[in-house]
Amino acid sequence: MNYIDIILGIILILSAIGGFKNGLIAEVVSLAALILGIWGAIHSSDITTDLLIRYFKLQSDYLNIISFIVTFIVIVILVHIVGNVISKMVDSGLLGITNKLGGLVFGVVRSVLFLSIVLMVFDKIDNDIEIIPKNIKENSRMYEPIRNIAPSIFPFIDIWNENQKPGKLKDVLTA
């Protein structure tokens, strides 16, 4: 066990605590709010642009960006309101502890997937410019197992990683 394991372990413990505290419904709603907010803003910000022009007489070079942000925020708030109502109903019933335990599991799984992608990107950078010595990563009990989770679930990620030629980042940074 080395400092990489300690850092990854702390992140996973904090994710478990946060997931337990929030519950499964709130954890899923947060992820759904982010996804729906981005999707909705991409597909509906033109409507927001029209409304901002019509009702507020706004004219700006940044109106599309402002519309995207406003649309994203409105969707995220609405999804969170619906999620809070559902979460309160579940917590008041007998499903409260199930919701909390599900949140713990979901929080850890979400963090493991995120960390896996971060570690893959970090590996690409670290192959070009050694930041962490190879023996430290090899002696870590958590680094490789967590790093390999995302490519096993999403094989296209590993293909992306294989197509990157070593040294490209180093060439860019030293140019």
Image (cartoon, grey):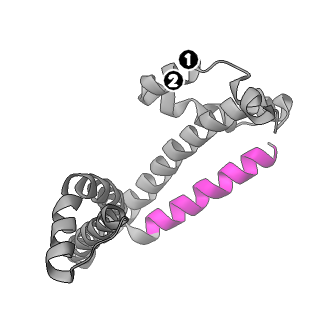
Based on the displayed image, in which of its 4 quarters is residue 155 positioned?
Answer: top left
Q: Is residue 25 visible?
A: no
Q: Secondary structure at mark 2?
A: helix
Q: Are marks 1 and 2 in contact (CB under 8 Å)?
A: yes
* Amino acid at pointer 2: Trp
Q: x and y percent of residue 172 in the render?
A: 72, 31
Residue 56, magenta (yes or no): no
Residue at the disc numbered 2: 160
Q: x and y percent of residue 173 in the render?
A: 76, 35
Instruction: Please tell me which residue is depicted at 36% across the width and 62% down the height of the picture.
Output: 65
Q: Nearer the viewer, residue 34 or 107?
A: 34
Q: Characterize the magenta stretch by its predominant secondary structure.
A: helix
Q: x and y percent of residue 83 in the render?
A: 25, 69
Q: Nearer the viewer, residue 97 or 65?
A: 65
Quadrant that contains the N terminus: top right
Q: Secondary structure at mark 1?
A: helix
Relative placement, left or right, of 78 versus 172 is left
Instruction: Please tell me which residue is depicted at 82% across the width and 38% down the height of the picture.
Output: 132
Compared with residue 19, is residue 80 higher up or lower down, i.e. above or below?
below
* Amino acid at pointer 1: Asn
Instruction: Please tell me which residue is depicted at 43% across the width and 24% down the height of the picture.
Output: 156
Compared with residue 94, is residue 175 higher up or lower down, i.e. above or below?
above
Residue at the disc numbered 1: 163
Q: Magenta segment range? A: 2-20
Tag of residue 10: none
Q: x and y percent of residue 120 in the render?
A: 61, 33
